[in-house]
Image: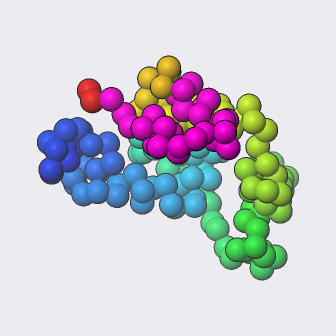
Amino acid sequence: MPHHPRTGRPDPARGAEGRAGHHLRRAIQRPYVTARALVTRRVDLAAFYDEPLDNPEVLAMAAKITCPPDPNSDYPTHFPGEVILHLTDGRTLRRRVPASHGTPEDPMPGAEVLAKFTANAGREFAPEQIRHLADLVQRLDQLNDVGELVTACVRPSR
């Protein structure tokens, strides 16, 4: 794995060429992200940092995907999405959502927010620190000083 030029530590955000942005370039490519979702049934941080980005099945699927402009989009008011799958047996499957999940139009239930936060924060923080952070956020309007939350966000030295 390439190393960060300043810290000398392994840096998964650098590609084989050692340049920053390798994961970001993949993450923002809609065909790649769509293919990853179709092949692995999930798109999360682990998909871009813990798993190979050159999965042949994902890359083969991405090569078949196009992302034309959406004439029915009302972006940036909403962030709609549509997937149209043309299957080898001739069928076409289509699903359109008027707004992304997690937006005011389609909010995530609290348990889902907590699960997503726990999965993402778990990449850097210990379980007890994640629970403490989640508790502080739940009580944010009752905190006397937001500094308590800021302090809790600091990762202990390794």
Closest to the observer, 46 or 30: 46
Q: Position of residue 95 (x, y in %)?
A: 83, 55
Q: Position of residue 44 (x, y in %)?
A: 56, 41
Residue at image position (50%, 20%) is 128
Residue at image position (27%, 30%) is 157
Closest to the observer, 143 or 26: 143
Q: Position of residue 137 (x, y in %)?
A: 62, 38
Residue at image position (27%, 43%) is 11
Is 135 inside the magenta-drawn segment? yes
The boundaries of the magenta stretch are 130-156
User: What secondary structure predominates along the stretch shown in magenta?
Assistant: helix
* Quarter placement of the N terminus: top left
Q: Position of residue 67 (x, y in %)?
A: 64, 68
Closest to the observer, 147 or 81: 147
Residue 86 can be seen, yes or no? no
Please determine whether, in this image, residue 61 is positioned above or below residue 72: above
Residue reaching furthest to the front: 144
Residue 125 location, quadrant: top left
Residue reaching furthest to the top: 128
Residue at image position (45%, 34%) is 152
Q: In this image, 136 relative to 88: left or right?
A: left
